[in-house]
Amino acid sequence: MADKAVMRPLYVPRLLPALILGIVSLLAGCDQLGIEAASTVSARKEADSKAIGGACRHAGRAIEDCYTLNKKADKAAVYAGWREMNEYMRDNKLEPVAPVIPPEPPKPPKVALSEADAEDDAGDPKPAAKPAKR
């Protein structure tokens, strides 16, 4: 008689805890997956906003200009950074550094067509294409 390999079914209740433990240990390292905690994101946004405020003060910009140029930044943190840089510059007798790169010119506003102009444009047929030369 030929020996047949007997395949035994896996005993699921023994493997289930090991499988769950493995999945939990992998998910514990969510920082490696690029998932950030809300506190980390908040701390980074505050630090960025303070840096923006400090840079604005160092460049000699008014705090209102800084708010206008950086609308997404947290205003309280921008002010805190601006104030810290102001104190630092005053204590160390530093002068503001004027920006060397000229600011971008303002974009011209888009002119909206009136309804009458829009109807005239829609009613004008386009000139026919020239026939191809043979």
Image (cartoon, grey):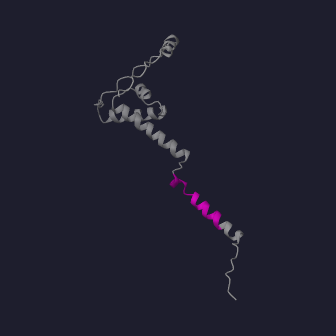
Q: Is residue 111 above or below residue 77?
A: above
Using the image as rendered, state which of residue 131 and residue 40 is in the foreground.
131
Query: Quarter-wise, where is residue 23 in the image?
Result: bottom right
Q: In terms of secondary structure, what is the magenta stretch mainly?
A: helix
Q: Position of residue 81 (x, y in %)?
A: 42, 35
Query: Quarter-wise, where is residue 128 in the image?
Result: top left
Q: Position of residue 38 (x, y in %)?
A: 55, 44
Question: Quadrant where the N terminus lies?
Answer: bottom right
Relative horizontal placement of residue 105, taking residue 73 as reference (left or right): left
Query: Quarter-wise, where is residue 39 in the image?
Result: top right
Q: Is residue 86 above or below residue 18?
A: above
The residue lying furthest to the front in this view is 134
Residue drawn at (50%, 16%), measured in percent from left and top? 122
Q: Position of residue 58 (x, y in %)?
A: 34, 33
Using the image as rendered, state which of residue 76 and residue 124 is in the foreground.
124
Question: Does the magenta-highlighted stretch encompass residue 61?
Answer: no
Q: Which residues are magenta?
A: 18-33
Question: Quadrant where the C terminus lies?
Answer: top left
Residue drawn at (68%, 83%), measured in percent from left and top? 4
The residue lying furthest to the top in this view is 116
